[in-house]
Image (cartoon, grey):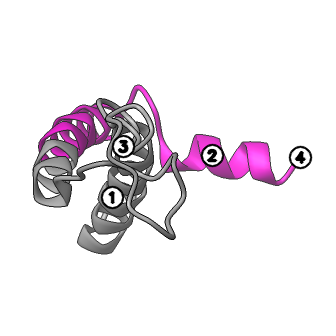
C-alpha cells in the first residue's frame, strides 16, 4: 500500500466516522424550548463542530491504523478487493 492509498483510506474512514458522530448528543431547538424565529424547530440548538472534528479525527486515526495493520499484515490484501470487483 503506497502513501496515496493510505491517505484515501484515511479520508474515507474520516468521512464515515464524521457522519456517524454528527448526530450524537445534539438536541434540537424545540427540545431546548429556544426556537429561533424563522428556523426549523429540529435544527440543532448548539453545535460544537470543532469538538466533533477532533473526535472524528481521533477515532478515524485509530480505525485507520487498525485497517492499515490488517492490510500490511497480509490478512486483507488489495488483490482480494480486485477479485471481488472483477467477478
Distance of mark 4 from mark 3, alpha carbons?
29 Å
Query: Could you say which quadrant of the image residue 60 lies in?
Result: top left
Name the residue at 45% across, 39% down: 30
**Residue named by callout 4:** 87
Name the residue at 34% across, 31% down: 24
CB-based contact (under 8 Å), mark 2 and mark 3: no
The percent position of residue 57, horizontal first and vertical second, equals: 16, 51
* Circle 1: element type: loop
Of badges 4 and 3, the one in the foreground is 3
Q: Earlier in the sequence, mark 3 or mark 1?
A: 1
Q: Nearer the viewer, residue 19 or 42?
A: 42
* Circle 3: element type: helix
* Residue 86 as seen in the image, left or right of residue 80: right
**Residue named by callout 3:** 17
**Residue named by callout 2:** 81
Q: Earlier in the sequence, mark 4 or mark 3?
A: 3
Q: Nearer the viewer, residue 43 or 1?
A: 43
Q: Earlier in the sequence, mark 4 or mark 1?
A: 1
The percent position of residue 44, horizontal first and vertical second, equals: 37, 49
Judged by its main secondary structure, the magenta piece is helix
The percent position of residue 63, horizontal first and vertical second, equals: 26, 35
Residue range highlighted in magenta: 58-87
Q: Earlier in the sequence, mark 2 or mark 1?
A: 1
Q: Nearer the viewer, residue 11 or 72?
A: 11
**Residue named by callout 1:** 1
Name the residue at 33% across, 58% down: 1
Amino acid at each position: 500500500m503506497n502513501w496515496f492509498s493510505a491517505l484515501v483510506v484515511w479520508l474515507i474512514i474520516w468521512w464515515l466516522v464524521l457522519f456517524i458522530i454528527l448526530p450524537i448528543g445534539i438536541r434540537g431547538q424545540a427540545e431546548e424550548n429556544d426556537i429561533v424565529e424563522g428556523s426549523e424547530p429540529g435544527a440543532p440548538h448548539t453545535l460544537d463542530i470543532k469538538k466533533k472534528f477532533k473526535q472524528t479525527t481521533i477515532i478515524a486515526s485509530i480505525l485507520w491504523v487498525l485497517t492499515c495493520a490488517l492490510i500490511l499484515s497480509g490478512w486483507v490484501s488489495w488483490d482480494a478487493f480486485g477479485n471481488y470487483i472483477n467477478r
